[in-house]
Amino acid sequence: MTLAPASEPIERFAAWYRDAADSGLKEPTAVALGTADASGQPSVRMVLLKGFDAAGFTFFTNTESRKGRELAANPRAALCFYWMPLGRSIRVVGRVEPVSAAEADAYYATRHRSSQIGAWASKQSRPLESRFELEKRVAEFGIKHAIGTVPRPPYWSGFRIVPATIEFWEERPFRLHDRQAYAREGDGWRVDRLYP
């Protein structure tokens, strides 16, 4: 066990993320997000990481979706990146906090106009009678917001996972993989090497 400065696991994540982005992977930001409802029932789905820094790891969604409701009831989550061609994985576990309205507005403004319309049209995670119903809603909101900027829906925002632990896994021959786990301790991190 050793101690590391606050920046070390984030800098290491940034280096591994750059390697994944430079490797030609189609979507290096794809990450499995695990949440649980108030009773502890877990669920996992893929999301896209939209930012990371010393404060945490950020993604955006409809807050009325299943994940949004689960995070409101139980504000803890886990992420798992798996970059198979590189033989690397990173797990992040921590508490969750909403991003500010300014952060949500800033990211929403960068989205393609069709994705902005889609955020209005989709009742994410709720039953959909037919594909036609979705296409009809997209057309309706497209007409409603035909001119000018498309405002951010009040139910669309972002969440930040503030990491309590970050584990780096790297593939090695004969399943003798390399694992290093960082656990937050005060202003720094405790670092443990783990058996594979």
Image (spheres, rainbow, N blue to C red):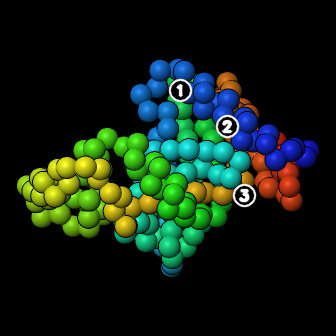
- Tell which of 69 and 55 is nearer to you: 55
Query: Could you tell me how far apart the alpha carbons at marks 1 and 3 are, in whole angstroms?
Result: 25 Å
Q: Along the polypeptide, which appears first: circle 3 or circle 2?
A: 2
- Tell me: 5 left or right of 139: right
Q: In the picture provided, is 135 more to the left or to the right than 62?
A: left
Q: Which secondary structure lies at badge 3? A: strand
Please report the residue visible at 79 percent of the width from the left and 42 percent of the height from the top.
Answer: 7
Image quarter hosting the C terminus: top right
Q: Which mark is residue 13?
A: 2
Local SS, label 2: helix
Q: Is residue 81 left or right of residue 187?
A: left
Is tag 2's residue or tag 1's residue first in the polypeptide sequence?
2
Ranked by sequence position, the earlier of labels 1 and 3 is 1
Q: Residue at x 66, y 57 (%)?
A: 162
Residue type, numbered disc 3: Ala
Q: Quadrant of residue 76?
A: bottom right
Q: Amino acid at mark 2?
A: Phe
The residue that label 1 is drawn on is 21
Q: CA distance from mark 3 to mark 2?
A: 14 Å
Q: In the rendering, which numbered label is found on residue 145?
A: none
Q: Which mark is residue 164?
A: 3
